[in-house]
Image (tube, rainbow, N blue to C red):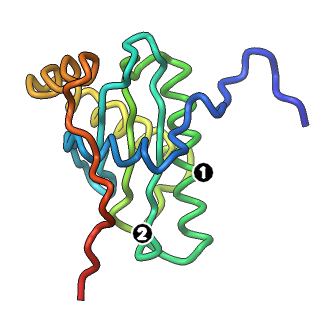
Amino acid sequence: MARAAGSAGFPRAARLLLPGDFARVFAVRRSAASGPLVLYACPALSAAQPARLGLSVSSRIGNAVVRNRWKRRLREAFRQVRARAALPHGNDFVIVVRSGAVPAGAAGARQVEEMICDLAARVVARPAYAAAAAATRQGTAPQPTTEPPRRRR
């Protein structure tokens, strides 16, 4: 089925796909949490680049049905927020889900959209984030380590 010309899609350019992209966002260590979501943010290499999104939904959240429901809800919320230009350009975001209950219905969709907007605004407004943005664009930002994460015993 073809999309409408003005559709607010979720193209590859709007997604974080590579493990290095996720590692870079986590290396900057700027986050905010609200309810079931934690949003990590990192300045993109170009300030003109549209906001990009990566999702992390652990198997601790629930079975495949619950995880995929969360991912669909988050992608749709990001599409809506991105279409309204409510997210600041030049940033990469990773959303981590902390709990299993997916907000249901239209009210749940609006709630997730508002959480994403609020969390993004909180992280980007912090003074330390502005310093991280300047360091990233100058090439002096912290680089992700190449060693694998330690496993808990």
Q: Is residue 29 left or right of residue 117?
A: left
Q: Secondary structure at mark 2?
A: loop
Residue 96 sits in which quadrant? Answer: bottom left
Q: CA distance from mark 1 to mark 2?
A: 14 Å
Q: Amino acid at mark 2?
A: Gly
Q: Residue furthest front?
A: 146
Q: Secondary structure at mark 1?
A: helix
Q: Residues within 10 Å of mark 2 (few under 14, many from 20)?
A: some
Query: Which residue position holds label 2?
Result: 100
* Front residue of 57 and 117: 57
Q: Is residue 41 left or right of residue 94?
A: left
Quadrant the C terminus occupies:
bottom left
> Horizontal and vertical percent for residue 131?
13, 22
Query: Which residue position holds label 1?
Result: 72
Which residue is found at the position 56% from the left and 43% from the top?
75
Q: Amino acid at mark 1?
A: Arg
- Relative to 9, does residue 57 appear above or below in the rendering? below
* Front residue of 149 and 123: 149
